[in-house]
Amino acid sequence: MLFTDMLVFSNIIYKQLNDYHDNNFCDDYLFEIKNNIKISSIVDANKIGIIDFRFILKKSNAMKLLGNKFLSLEKEINEKIKKKQQYLNNKEENIKKSKNNLSELEYKNKLKLFKNEVFNTQKKYKEERVLLNKSFQKIQKDIKDLLAQIIKDVSIKKNINIVLLKENVFLFNDTNSDFTLEVLELFNNKTKSMKIIITSPE
């Protein structure tokens, strides 16, 4: 079908080019079209594979494990922040209550120290979240790279020359060209003993 379409296209181009007087330009252009037709005729449709990369990541055990680990650590951070906020709130109330028993200078110093503690606490948990996110992104990239390598290995084994992402394919009539489930099973087997280790400060 692709060969026929390109042949019809080349005939239309040839007819249009005959209306011009620049014969050298016509010859060069038609030569290029003929070469492209020859190249396209070499590509075997059976050598094209379809893969749903996003589906594999979504359904894979590795990404589920990573997601659960991330949520677990994020929950731990939130709980620590909540406890620290309660502690700081109580401390602030005690400082205010002691105002009448302190000199103005002592009171200001206490407030200054308290504000510094609040600032350092906010900074600490902000850095902890950044570290968690970076660790998550790093592991996620490693998982994607591993999946890409598995897809490449399977495509070579199946003698597939071109692999297309399913999301970019408008239509494919041969379901055998889609080897997503095969890769998903292999990917799960390769990562079933994988451990998710995210560096996070205490």
Image (cartoon, rainbow, N blue to C red):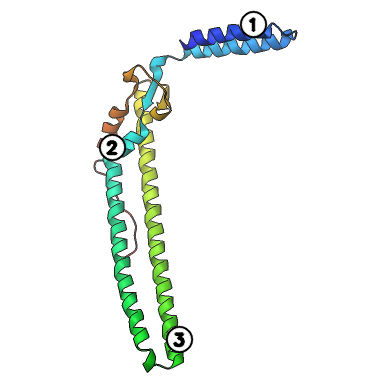
Q: Amino acid at mark 1?
A: Lys
Does residue 17 appear to the left or right of 96 in the view shown? right
Q: Amino acid at mark 3?
A: Lys
Q: Residue at left 59%, top 6%?
A: 11
Residue 102, given in percent of the width and then of the height, sits at 39, 93
Does residue 170 appear to the left or right of 191 in the view shown? right
* Element on which disc 2 rests: helix
N-terminal label among 1 and 2? 1
Q: CA distance from mark 1 to mark 3?
A: 90 Å
Q: Residue at left 38%, top 65%?
A: 125
* Element on which disc 1 rests: helix
Q: Residue at left 30%, top 47%?
A: 66
N-terminal label among 1 and 3? 1
* Element on which disc 3 rests: helix
Q: Quadrant of residue 172?
A: top left
Nearer to us of marks 2 and 3 is: 3
Q: Residues within 10 Å of mark 2 (few under 14, many from 20)?
A: few
Q: Which mark is residue 121?
A: none
